[in-house]
Image (cartoon, rainbow, N blue to C red):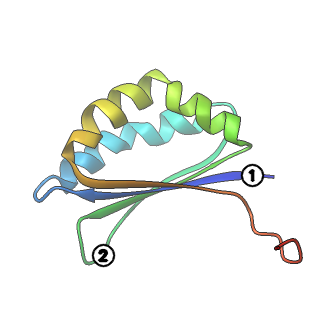
Amino acid sequence: MSFVVVARYVVQPGERDRVLELLAPMVSASLAEPGCRRYGVHTGVEDDVVVLVEEYDGESDFARHCETEHFQRIVLGQVVPLLADRQVTRCTPFQPGTEA
């Protein structure tokens, strides 16, 4: 089973290009981590929203990702201060027939 994280960043006015520049090295660094299956950065077509879609083998792989030097330095240290809002949603696959 995989573990998916969707991070929605509302960027402060005028900071979108800087946020994207900062996130560029996160893609290759994250994909090199054990358990990281996908790490995609997407931009809003009509607004200053940046969405990250990440997929890991399991929740523990995501937890290890959050402890990496590049996550701490780039995302928490440089990107987050440029955001007006940040929402992180942790997801597991929906399996029809198992809902309560």
Residue type of the residue flagged with mark 2: Val
Outermost front residue: 100
- At horizontal 89% and vertical 77% (from top left) the residue drawn is 97
Q: Position of residue 28 (x, y in %)?
A: 49, 38
Left or right? Give the position of 43 relative to 11: right
- Secondary structure, mark 1, is loop
Q: Is residue 74 above or below residue 100?
A: above
Marking on residue 45: 2
Residue behind mark 1: 2
User: At numbered mark 2, what does the secondary structure look like: helix, strand or loop?
Assistant: loop
Measure the C-alpha gap from mark 2 to mark 1: 28 Å
Q: Residues within 10 Å of mark 1 (few under 14, many from 20)?
A: some
Where is residue 24? Give x, y as percent: 36, 43
Report the residue at 29% width, 50% height from top.
Answer: 20
Residue at the (53%, 36%) spot, across then down: 30
Residue 23 circle label: none
